[in-house]
Amino acid sequence: MQSENSEEARSVAGATDTRGKHRISAELKRLEQETRFLEIDCKLLMQNCGLGRPSQCGL
């Protein structure tokens, strides 16, 4: 009986770990996408200002 409970606990812990890994992976992908968007936005702002450095544009 005790071995059944420990096996069940390991199964639940494994499922929780998998969901946690997926959540972290999804968050990482979202942050990478946001970073790419911000890099593109920054480049466009620099081009519109006609300057090479963001600090010269007031950013």
Image (spheres, rainbow, N blue to C red):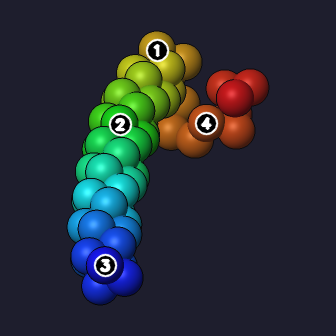
Q: Which residue is mark 2?
A: 30
Residue 52 placement (x, y as % from top left): 50, 39
The relative height of residue 33 versus residue 2 in the rendered view (above or below) is above
> Does dot 4 land on a helix, a strand or a loop?
helix
The amino acid type, in three-letter code, at marker 1 is Asn
Left or right, 11 with respect to 37, comes to left
- In the image, is residue 24 above or below residue 33? below
Residue where numbered disc 1 is placed = 48
Q: Are marks 4 and 3 in contact (CB under 8 Å)?
A: no
Q: Earlier in the sequence, mark 1 or mark 4?
A: 1
Mark 4, residue position: 54
Q: Does the image show residue 18? A: yes
Discs 1/2, front? 2
Dot 2 crowding, Cα within 10 Å, few <14, some 14–19, many 20+ = few
Is residue 39 left or right of 54 when viewed as pictured?
left
Nearer to the camera, 43 or 48: 43
Residue 31 x/y as whole percent: 41, 41
Query: How busy is the neighbourhood of tag 1: few (under 14 within 10 Å), some, or many (20 plus)?
Result: few
Residue located at (34% from left, 73% from top): 5
